[in-house]
Amino acid sequence: MIEYLFFRIAYQISKWLSFKTLYKLSDFLYVVLYKITKYRRNVVYENLHRCFPEYSEEKIEQTAKKYYRHLADMFLETLKFFSLDREELQRRFFVENPEELNKYYYMSKNIIMSGAHIGNWELGPLSSPYWFRPQIVVLYKPIHNVKINAFIKRKRTKHGTRMVSIDITGRSFTHGNKPFCVVMLSDQNPPNPDKSLWVNFFGIPTATLHGLELYAKRYNLPVLYFDMKKTDRGRYNVRIETLIDNPKGLPKGYITWKYMQRVEHAIREKPELWLWSHRRWKHQFAPEKYKLYSFEQKEEIKTDSETETSPNLISHQE
């Protein structure tokens, strides 16, 4: 109850504050996170060293500081976003090419929108219904505090987005008669490595959630990617890209590999915008137990019907 009370107080304060004042408060929160409490600094530095071995210590520290500044911004501005109207949301979450997604609506096709924890992903559920024609269905992980979870879910859905818990992911793909777009952020650490697909991510064998590929192939759904860039504090631009137009018959692991390659590219462009304080590599790759999927981009990808062991597929068993 106390946790919920503090959360509601923070939300109310964020409603009253201007963005200018909010970001002054964020500057103070950055000091608290980075210098005073040192929030997950070991995790952040370990992840940065792992992904960017070519970085000097000075560059690692610069990137970490930028990350904590963004993290502070994101925490406070997210509370503020919950209270914004349509016009303000669209100014702060600007989609450059909504037609890339909407074209599937006019074809009466359901789709999957893949993304990553880059920028401020909370703006997606709030703003997407104003940019896109299909019903937006967002998969989410429920918060342990029931009251906070109910409050946030109510705010996320007030503009028309449907939220579905990852515990019942399959229900996302049985949604009414209107074409829908299921949004999946699959760059988190999977709970079960045995059900994961293993691909190289920053040159590291990485366990990856299998749902994106599973449902794309099961229902033959095009897979799109939203590339989010931060243009200013509290302002984000999004560009939609089609990763896979026809997943049927693609070899196992290819969709997951392609998605993770795209996420890595986005992170390398602006490292400070990814969620570095998350423990991404909890699971260790065991070559005698797992298969590592890797594909050469320059070669033509063969379908399952042509061969299960395409020459583009490398199974590391060393």
Image (tube, rainbow, N blue to C red):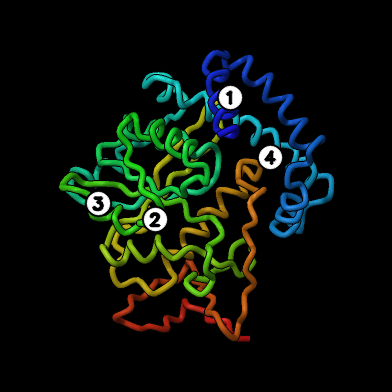
Farthest residue, direction right: 57
Q: Amino acid at mark 4?
A: Tyr
| Residue at (51, 75) in percent of width and height | 194
Residue at mark 2: 243
Secondary structure under tag 3 reads loop
Q: Residues within 10 Å of mark 1 (few under 14, many from 20)?
A: some
Q: Residues within 10 Å of mark 4 (few under 14, many from 20)?
A: many
Q: CA distance from mark 2 to mark 4?
A: 27 Å
Answer with left or right where residue 217 lies relative to residue 241.
left
Q: CA distance from mark 1 to mark 4?
A: 22 Å
**Residue 120, above or below 255:** above
Choose mark 1 or mark 3, whichever is in front.
1
Choose mark 2 or mark 4, whichever is in front.
4
| Residue at (50, 45) in percent of width and height | 143
Q: Residues within 10 Å of mark 3 (few under 14, many from 20)?
A: many
Residues at marks 3 and 4 touching, judged by CB atoms closer than 8 Å: no
Choose mark 1 or mark 4, whichever is in front.
1
Q: Amino acid at mark 1?
A: Ala
Residue 10 - label: 1
Q: Amino acid at mark 3?
A: Asn
Residue at mark 3: 110
Residue at mark 4: 67
